[in-house]
Image (tube, coloured by chain):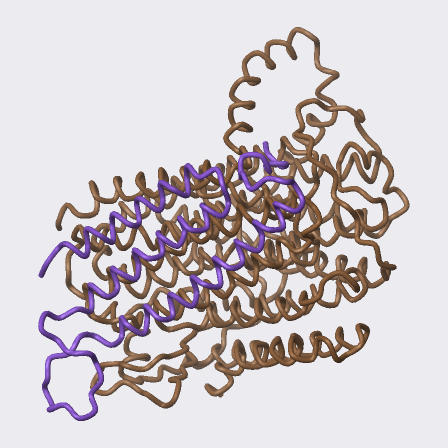
Chain colours: A purple, B brown
Amino acid sequence: VSYLPYAVAAWLFLVGLYGVVTSRNLIHLALCLSVMQSSTYVLLLAIGYKSGGTAPIFRGIPLGTRAVDPVVQALTLTDIVVSVTVVALILALALDVHDEADTVDPDEIAALHG
Amino acid sequence: MNVVLPLTVAVPLAGAALLAATDQLLPEWVKEYPAMLVAAATSVLTILVLTHTQRTDALHWFGGWQPRHGVSIGIDFATGPLGAGFAALSSVLVTAALVFSWHYMQEAPRLFRVLMLVFCAGMNGFAFSGDLFNMFVWFELLGVATYALAGYQVEQLGPLQGAVNFAITNSVGSFALLFGTALLYGRTGALNFAQVGHALEGRHADGLLVVAFTLIVAGFFVKSALVPFHLWLADTYAVSPAPVCLIFAGVLSEVGLFGLARVYWTVFEAPFGSHARDVRNVLLAVGIATALLGALMAFLQRHLKRLLAYTVISHVGLTLIGIGLLDAKSLAGAANLVLSHAFIKGGLFLGTGVLLRELGSVDELRLHGRAGGLRVLGIVFGLGAVGLAGTPYLGTFLGHSLLDDGARADGFGWIPPVVMVAAGLSSAAMLRAFARIFLGWGPTRDTLLTEEPREEPPEEQANRPIMVGVTASLIVLGLLLSIVPGLQDRSDAGARRFVDRHAYIERVLHGKVRVHRGSPAVVLHAAGPTSIAYGLGGLILAVGLAWFGLHRQRAPGRLREAAGRALGPPISALKGVHSGVVGDYVAWVTVGTAVLGGVWALTLARGP
């Protein structure tokens, strides 16, 4: 098993996390969240990968053919749908923040604290 | 009966879709009724499931894909009494929130009712879900519906900040949850709780399992706002509309704890069971820190909803203590805490909605003495605050006394006093606010308390009798829950079945139906003397601290100066941590996850 995809997944997760923590722009922040979520796609696909495996479409191929795991692919698809919804919502909120406060800097909209 | 399980999700989702589709067609006043009807019907369905689970666990395989020879490839809903009770609680609360908002939010919220029904479906799906990935999907569905519900008053900055902080912090949490789920799938090749638990049977804890467990727990801790993952909650709950706060405080905050309990007792108990002590120590430490910190922060607030929000955090900590003791008795205590807290705290949040509507403010100092006319509301508000202190035979007392029994049986006799202090302090905050607002006691200035921006009251004509009626009935119901005969035995039995991993695996993978005959007697047990003592202690502490909060200016000047010098810096540092900036919150989430993982890596992965 190659460890490269796992390293890439961990890297994407951490670099996205760094972006979320330090971001001064809500749109940039939403994209950092997408980067974080991309790490889960890489992780899921890496887990289901079999070297030399074919796509998991079982019509017309001999029984016992090596195929990659279809479950993680379904999970990844669902995951993408979920991520699109969340990012769309955050971007919509960013627009409203901009209309209201004339800024998209999360540091400047902290009306409530303490 | 098992076919009812998917209906508890399908009915509210279909209702939501229909409502959304006909949104432009129906006149505004018509739309309220179908939503309430759908929520009420869902409540009936979940209660049917709850009664059914008294005898045997409910199980449904979608599309009839049942396991063969103990191997499952299908997707299932499976629940015992605790899961069904949680779902029934959330459906009932959604119904109550919709009735409360009958006129409260008539104009503004275009898809408010649609989102409420989606929330209802998400809660039921989460409670019944039989596998990790579907749990994650319901978790995200809940997330999206609640981010939108929180940030609904988009013409104000406060709610926008609350929604942004909520959405971003919780998204990071759910990525952690998904990452952990994926690792677990990689190890076991399964997602079904029973299947994963079966696969891990007899395995020892290793690095991968510890990382997976840490990430899953961190995801749940963000949603349930445990220290230090809790920072987003006060920003969000302080600005959400009152009916939304009802469902947030009542069930959404407890979702993560339910998930944690479900995952621990179906999956991780197998590899970690021999190290249960190390899991327990961490959960207890987090629970205690949360309970005390939340109560302290509540005591420092003057914005009523933010105050209540911090008491929710404190309560979640108490509930985690109940779960973290990792035995059935304490789990039953936690379940009862959730149940009575949901009604009372939800009712108190609705009460703030009435105050905002009638008096145009939710600020404790600005409302000083102005709510004397709202007599019914005042009475239930005060009683609610008393009922959350663990006062004997009132409100959360049953939960406290079960927790007391459980903790002492496990040799943790020092935990009940800690619980008493936390519950007493958070009740004191509520009692102080009650005395100021409804009785006009104490001074109108208090520099200790944090000032927050005003919230605009809803503009429409409201139906005050309905609003006060719903508020009062929720609080009164919550207060009475400690003296419902038979509830203790039923929750005990439910908790024992919840922690029985082997029975769960047998039921799900091998279809072995276990019938629990002879329902427990309908009796009210007398609580132990220590439970009553701690309950009275909590009440005395609450009243005493509330009095102190009102009248501390009467203390001699030198004493006040000394106290200010000693306590001022730590208090402002503590307030400073709650900065309202989302980047800081995510940084704390990272720190918390690293600490959890570090401690468990050192203790759990040691081998047998």
Residue B308 position in % (x across, y down): 64, 44
Of all residues, the one furthest to the right in this rendering is B373
Of all residues, the one furthest to the top in this rendering is B558
In the figure, is residue B597 to the left or right of B437?
Answer: left
Q: Residue at x 51, y 21 (%)?
A: B570
**Foreground of the two, A46 or B531:** A46
- In this picture, is B389 found above or below B487? above
Is residue B404 visible in the rendered image? The answer is no
Residue B57 position in % (x across, y down): 41, 78
Q: Residue B180 occupies which quadrant of the picture?
A: bottom left
Q: Quadrant of the C terminus of chain A?
A: top right
Q: Residue at x 22, y 50 (%)?
A: B275
**Foreground of the two, B180 or B85:** B180
Residue A96 position in % (x across, y down): 63, 50
- In this picture, is B508 found above or below A100? below
- In this picture, is B67 found above or below B140? below
In the figure, is residue B407 to the left or right of B458?
Answer: left
- In this picture, is A75 found above or below B582? below
In the figure, is residue B400 to the left or right of B281?
Answer: right
Q: Residue at x 58, y 52 (%)?
A: A93
Q: Residue at x 28, y 78 (%)?
A: B506
In the figure, is residue B74 to the left or right of A45?
Answer: right
Count of marks placed on residues: 0
Is residue B289 visible in the rendered image? The answer is yes
Residue B185 position in % (x across, y down): 24, 66
Q: Quadrant of the N terminus of chain A?
A: bottom left
Q: Residue B23 occupies which quadrant of the picture?
A: bottom right
Q: Residue B158 occupies which quadrant of the picture?
A: top right
Of all residues, the one furthest to the bottom in this rendering is A60
